[in-house]
Image: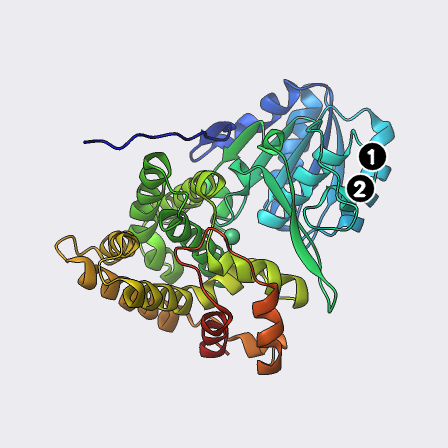
Amino acid sequence: MMPPLDFTTLPLPAIHFGDGRFSMLAELARSFGKSVLLVTGGHTLQNSGRLSALEDALGERGVKVFHQVAEGEPSPELVDLAVSRWKGEGISSVVAAGGGSAIDAGKAISAMMPQSLPAERFIEGRPGFLPHDGRKLPFIAVPTTSGTGSEVTNNAVISRVGPEGFKRSLRHPSFVPDIAVIDPELMITASRELTASSGMDACTQLIEALTSPLATPYTDAVAKSGLERFSRSFIAVCSGRGDESALRGDIAYGALMSGIALSNAGLGIVHGFASSVGGLFDIPHGVLCATLLLEATRENINCLQHLDPKHPMLDRYAIAGRILSGSAESDIADGCSRLLETLEEWQELLGFPRLRKFGIVPEDFERIAALTRSKTNAVDLDHNSMQRILSSRW
Ligand SMILES: [Fe+2]
């Protein structure tokens, strides 16, 4: 008998996915009004000529364009500076085109433009936190990497990195972008390293959503669909083999599904570390996910097996293992082993850097464990488990 189900889902943007969809952007932005703030990351779009093509297309439609560059993961200061710079310009919508950081910067700027207080007041867990009222400018997200799934999520990750640093979210259901334009052709110029680390972020999000205690049949279907497309193309795209456009499409789809799944099911211990380690040390989010996923998965599976060799969560890890390894016939124990073997192969092949490379020392582990929270991890991990994960990747 089907068990009873009670769950809600977050809204989704209007999604335009596929090669060439970037050409729809000017018309979509014009539908919100005649003055657009473009937020971009580094120079990828500029160098490819796409930025000037977009500006021309907007100009032809009588749309005034303002441009904010947001390099690196956004800080509250960057968001406040952009808001004060552009507030008087009558901006009708914000379009962010870039990696996850640029999209989060644009999302935060669109959320803060109608507000009068600084961004930090609305960041979860910060002193004097105030719930955001949800008013924002219309926002269009255009990812140029496949990883965070920020094009469909309700939060923008904001950080100030350092000994007293933090990496936390500005969040409201209304922050889900109004439109997501996902064009795999934009991702072709991403380097092998960036493709690998951002792809591992998406993979981590898919596995963590699948093994979350808050998973539902909806998030399961989304996460499995994402893992299937992701796993068939990930190594090929990182190795530069095969039809680049089709492979990039699979990875972009996996990242998109990971965003939908995580919004509704939450994430596990790797993303708990992303918040604690990410606030203290300057380490890109995708790289941290890439380097921790194997050992975090091993620790989760070991703890579950210790609790109960027939724990239902082990079946979920086995499902991920069957999809990633392509071995449909394995039982639960085999499936879990296949998952670890596949992640180990990827780690060796792609050479994810160790934690020591980012200035982390073993004396930091206790403090990191004390700061790390993950209510939606597959199993409740104690500080010893957390420190084992960190030390095995040091
Ligand atoms: Fe992530």
In the picture of the structure, the residue carrying the numbered disc 2 is 82
User: What scheme was used to colour the molecule?
Assistant: rainbow
Numbered circles on residues, count:
2
Q: Nearer the viewer, residue 352 or 186?
A: 352
Q: Nearer the viewer, residue 320 or 17?
A: 320
Query: What residue is drawn where x is 44% and y is 55%?
Result: 377
Residue 179 in sight = yes
Q: Amino acid at mark 2?
A: Ala
Quadrant of residue 296 in the image?
A: bottom left
Query: What residue is drawn where x is 51% and y is 56%?
Result: 374
User: Which residue appears farthest toward the left when viewing the image?
Assistant: 329
Q: Do tag 2 and tag 1 residues touch (Cβ < 8 Å)?
A: yes
Which quadrant holds the N terminus?
top left
- Residue 334 percent across, percent down from the top left: 18, 63
Helix, strand or loop at label 1? It is: helix
- As displayed, is residue 150 above or below residue 54? below
Query: What residue is drawn where x is 73% and y is 69%?
Result: 163
Q: Is residue 137 left or right of residue 265?
A: right
Specify the label residue 293 is tagged with. none
Residue 42 in sight = no
In the picture of the structure, the residue carrying the numbered disc 1 is 86
- Residue 142 percent across, percent down from the top left: 56, 37
User: Which residue appears farthest toward the front when viewing the image?
Assistant: 307
- Residue 139 percent across, percent down from the top left: 64, 30
Quadrant of residue 50 in the image?
A: top right
Helix, strand or loop at label 2? It is: helix
- As displayed, is residue 302 above or below residue 376? below
Q: Amino acid at mark 1?
A: Trp
Q: Nearer the viewer, residue 20 or 15?
A: 15
